[in-house]
Amino acid sequence: MSWVLLFIAGLLEVAWAAGLKSSEGFTRLGPSVFTVVTALGSFVLLALAMRQLPLGTAYAVWTGIGAVGAFVFGIVMLGEAVTLPRIASALLIVVGLIGLKLSSGH
């Protein structure tokens, strides 16, 4: 269950990062509220997942999901550049996340 909570927390991290971009420096009310709510949700779920998972593993997976998710969101929704070095770098993060999951013992 802790891995499910951590995964959802990571998805919420992607959501608040996208909201932060849309908030234009917290100058737009709707995206600003969305950002704060999803960030709080992400932190709460991360904290719950950390009850069972090691700190380093949970935090690295959470930030990794957020980083790769924001990367994909930027490409798909914002038209950010798709280059081989960017794709390869994101894949390295994914490989690291898989390694952490497989070696966690949970």
Image (cartoon, rainbow, N blue to C red):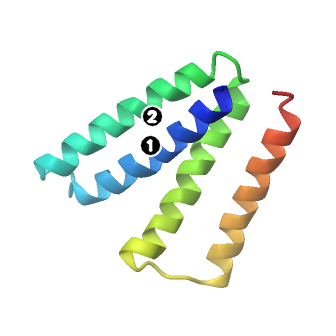
Tell me, yes or no, if residue 26 can be seen here: no
Examine the rendered structure and indicate whether residue 85 appears above or below residue 6: below
Could you tell me how many numbered marks the image carries?
2
Q: Name which residue lies at 55% across and 54% down.
A: 67
Q: State left or right for residue 56 relative to residue 40.
A: right
Q: Secondary structure at mark 2?
A: helix
Q: Secondary structure at mark 1?
A: helix
Q: Amino acid at mark 1?
A: Leu
Q: State left or right for residue 55 relative to residue 96.
A: left
Do the numbered discs 2 and 1 sit on residues whose CB atoms are within 8 Å? Answer: yes
Q: Name which residue lies at 62% across and 34% down.
A: 4
To which quarter of the image does residue 3 belong? Answer: top right
Q: State left or right for residue 25 relative to residue 4.
A: left
Examine the rendered structure and indicate whether residue 35 appears above or below residue 94: above
Q: State left or right for residue 28 relative to residue 12.
A: left
Tell me, yes or no, if residue 94 can be seen here: yes
Report x, y in % for residue 59: 63, 34
Label 2: few (<14), some or many (≥20) within 10 Å? many
What number is the disc on residue 12? 1
Q: Circle 2 is placed at which residue position?
A: 42
Q: Name which residue lies at 88% across and 37% down.
A: 103
Report x, y in % for residue 71: 52, 65
Q: Amino acid at mark 2?
A: Ser
Report x, y in % for residue 33: 20, 40
What number is the disc on residue 75? none
